[in-house]
């Protein structure tokens, strides 16, 4: 009987708000027609920036370039195409997907969407920890996700949402333990904050403002 009460309490205070949050996320994805757009080539806002990242992943795949020498197929200066930009971890990982399964920009958008989803779920857990309520966490994060920009960038070729995701993960490790920060928590915070900043410098504003 006691276990039954515990299970009912968990379903009411944890399971149900989490389910509502996930349903809302699915509704937003459906409205944005994300799954119909995953095969699209770079399009829309910041087309040139999206093309640069997509080209970098394809160049890694075709040229087998060193991780430390990212290249673009269309470079205005220099025939070698060596490019400068953010830490190229996303194009490099995507290039390995191309190596394994063949070129398809679905993998690039899909990988960015995967990182974005992790960020959304970690944002929910972060708010649940800070507010001590899964219901309030569901409401707050659902309102946050209602921003069209959040959904648009969650499956684009740009690093904005992955950077934000790593920022949220870093912040989660700051508050995860009730008994204060541990050396492992500080290490994990520093690691994910660094990845966030390397992908998008503005990501450091989120983590270090905390």
Image: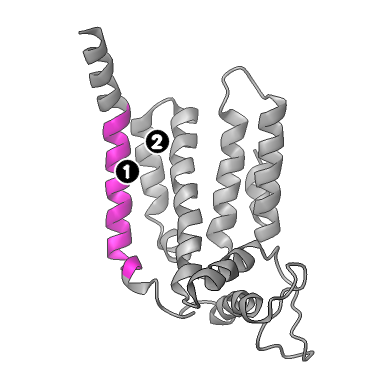
Relative placement, left or right, of 64 versus 30 is right
Question: Mark 1, residues whose alpha carbon is within 10 Å: few (<14), some, or many (≥20)?
Answer: many
Is there a contact, CB below 8 Å, between mark 2 and mark 1? yes
Relative placement, left or right, of 48 versus 119 is right
Q: Nearer the viewer, residue 182 or 3?
A: 3
Relative placement, left or right, of 61 versus 33 is right
**75 to 145, vertically: above or below:** below
The image quarter in which residue 80 lies = bottom right
Q: Residue furthest top?
A: 2
Provide the secondary structure element on which disc 2 rests.
helix
Query: Residue 196 location in percent, x, y?
Result: 65, 52
Q: Coloring scheme of the render?
A: one colour
Query: Residue 188 location in percent, x, y?
Result: 66, 37
Residue on which disc 1 sits: 21
Q: Main secondary structure of the magenta part?
A: helix
Span colored in magenta? 14-35
Residue on which disc 2 sits: 137
């Amino acid at each position: 009987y006691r276990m039954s009460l515990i299970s009912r309490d968990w379903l009411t205070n944890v399971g149900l708000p989490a389910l509502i949050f996930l349903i809302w996320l699915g509704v937003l994805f459906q409205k944005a027609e994300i799954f119909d757009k995953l095969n699209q080539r770079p399009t829309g806002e910041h087309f040139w920036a999206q093309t640069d990242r997509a080209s970098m992943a394809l160049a890694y795949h075709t040229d087998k370039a060193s991780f430390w020498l990212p290249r673009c197929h269309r470079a205005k200066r220099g025939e070698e195409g060596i490019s400068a930009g953010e830490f190229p971890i996303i194009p490099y990982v995507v290039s390995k997907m191309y190596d394994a399964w063949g070129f398809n920009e679905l993998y690039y958008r899909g990988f960015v969407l995967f990182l974005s989803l992790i960020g959304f779920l970690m944002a929910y857990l972060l708010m649940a920890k800070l507010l001590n309520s899964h219901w309030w966490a569901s409401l707050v994060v659902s309102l946050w996700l209602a921003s069209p920009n959040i959904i648009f960038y969650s499956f684009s070729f740009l690093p904005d949402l992955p950077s934000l995701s790593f920022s949220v993960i870093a912040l989660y490790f700051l508050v995860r333990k009730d008994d204060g920060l541990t050396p492992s928590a500080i290490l994990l915070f520093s690691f994910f904050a660094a990845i966030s900043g390397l992908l998008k410098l503005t990501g450091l504003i989120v983590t270090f403002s905390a």
